[in-house]
């Protein structure tokens, strides 16, 4: 049985990368039934670029976020399989075929998603090299069955999407985790290195730290939700790495008086990330590993700050009133 594939690409101000993204779809080794670009109220040449390719172009008149854009795309999709692809990514040629093969072979599989290539789509410097290298590392480490789906390069049967329900359009970050909460109890989720995408990442340090902080605001609520449902999220950093980073940053004020304390904490942080540092040295040369260690610590600082802020907000948020249980007054 031949399964048809609709590729859904949400796009907002994606003029820099959209042509490469679309060209990678049309270069797939398997036939693509339909390509849908959802222009989420872009103000650049996104729509103009989409019109140069034989795709279906849909447009939001106001920016509604990636969740709404994906929902709009699926509503117009007619393929048996929906392949989500972010507009700042370009697939390797066999990625769609691999997704179809995995879904066809296992009817219990509700979603298959892929890894980031270790080199960026466009190389804009060492910050971006670090970011994509780390993104590749932690995803490749988690290949196999997971309980978290990342939808930047992922495929699922359209009937599964319809049964689980669309994306929560109130979320502009961590929408993957909320979707996974509803998907994982009913279907297998598979992370494979047969689906690979080159990603154009943030290449400036301060915006990278700001993005990490913003995404971490929902980390504690997401982890709490996963724990309540007995599910383990696939995370970018290990608990040992986060704990060692917190210890290193907390002991930095001791540097002038007791330098051995933060130095030992920093060594513990490097030990917790030894696999990443070795991979960085192999892939980019030994001199890149110390740079990765330092930048990785800064990113952990932004993550810890965002997670702590999110935890405080969750604690201070008003709790919903208990559901009425009927009149319990004595007869």
Image: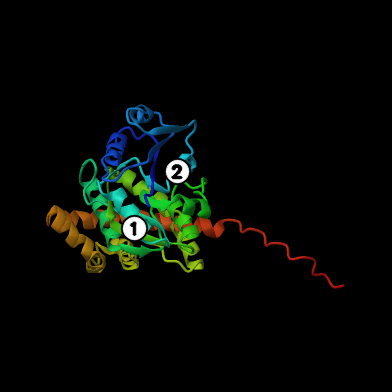
Depth check, front residue: 215 or 259 = 215
Residue at (36% x, 64% y) in the render:
145
Helix, strand or loop for disc 1: helix
Depth check, front residue: 136 or 328 = 136
Label drawn at residue 102:
1
Give the percent coordinates (x, y) of residue 154.
37, 51
How is colour applied across the structure in the image?
rainbow
Local crowd size for mark 2, using a 10 Å CA cut-off: few (<14), some (14–19), many (≥20): many
Give the percent coordinates (x, y) of residue 86.
36, 43
Label drawn at residue 236:
none
**Side (left or right) of 154 relative to 288:** right
Residue 82 in view in this figure: yes
> Quadrant location of the C terminus?
bottom right
Residue at (48% x, 63% y) in the render:
186
Check the image and report above or below for 306 versus 206.
below
Depth check, front residue: 325 or 52 = 52
Dot 2 or dot 1: first in sequence order is 2
* Count of numbered circles on the image: 2
Q: Quadrant of residue 303?
A: bottom left
Look at mark 2 in the image and give the residue it sits on: 70
**Side (left or right) of 304 relative to 313:** left
Could you give the CA–CA distance between mark 2 and mark 1, rounded to whole angstroms? 22 Å
Local crowd size for mark 1, using a 10 Å CA cut-off: few (<14), some (14–19), many (≥20): some
Residue 235 in view in this figure: no
Check the image and report above or below for 203 versus 223.
above
Residue at (31% x, 43% y) in the render:
31
> Which residue occupies the extreme bottom position in the image?
330
Q: Are marks 2 and 1 in contact (CB under 8 Å)?
A: no
Give the percent coordinates (x, y) of residue 176.
43, 53
Q: Quadrant of residue 5?
A: top left
Disc 2 vs disc 1: which is toward the camera?
Answer: 1
């Amino acid at each position: 049985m031949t399964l048809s594939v609709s590729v859904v690409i949400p796009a907002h101000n994606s003029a820099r990368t959209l042509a490469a993204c679309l060209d990678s779809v049309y270069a797939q080794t398997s036939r693509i039934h339909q390509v849908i670009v959802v222009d989420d109220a872009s103000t650049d040449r996104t729509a103009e670029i989409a019109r140069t390719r034989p795709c279906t172009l849909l447009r939001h008149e106001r920016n509604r976020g990636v969740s709404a854009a994906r929902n709009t795309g699926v509503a117009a999709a007619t393929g048996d399989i929906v392949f989500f692809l972010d507009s700042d990514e370009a697939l390797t040629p066999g990625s769609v075929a691999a997704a179809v093969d995995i879904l066809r072979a296992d009817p219990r599989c509700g979603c298959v998603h892929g890894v980031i290539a270790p080199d960026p789509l466009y190389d804009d410097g060492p910050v971006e090299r670090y970011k994509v290298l780390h993104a590749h590392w932690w995803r490749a480490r988690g290949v196999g069955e997971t309980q978290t789906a990342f939808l930047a390069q992922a495929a699922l049967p359209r009937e599964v999407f319809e049964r689980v329900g669309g994306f929560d359009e109130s979320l502009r970050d961590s929408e993957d985790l909320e979707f996974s909460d509803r998907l994982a109890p009913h279907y297998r989720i598979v992370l494979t290195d047969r689906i690979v995408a080159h990603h154009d990442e943030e290449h400036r340090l301060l915006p990278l730290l700001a993005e990490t902080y913003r995404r971490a605001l929902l980390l504690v609520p997401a982890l709490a939700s996963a724990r309540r449902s007995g599910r383990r999220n696939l995370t970018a950093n290990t608990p040992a790495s986060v704990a060692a980073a917190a210890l290193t940053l907390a002991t930095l004020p001791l540097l002038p008086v007791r330098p051995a304390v933060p130095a030992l904490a920093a060594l513990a942080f490097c030990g917790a990330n030894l696999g990443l540092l070795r991979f960085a040295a192999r892939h980019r040369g030994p001199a890149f590993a110390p740079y990765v260690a330092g930048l990785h610590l800064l990113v952990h600082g932004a993550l810890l700050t965002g997670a702590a802020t999110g935890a405080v907000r969750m604690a201070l948020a008003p709790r919903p009133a208990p559901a009425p249980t009927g009149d319990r007054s004595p007869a």
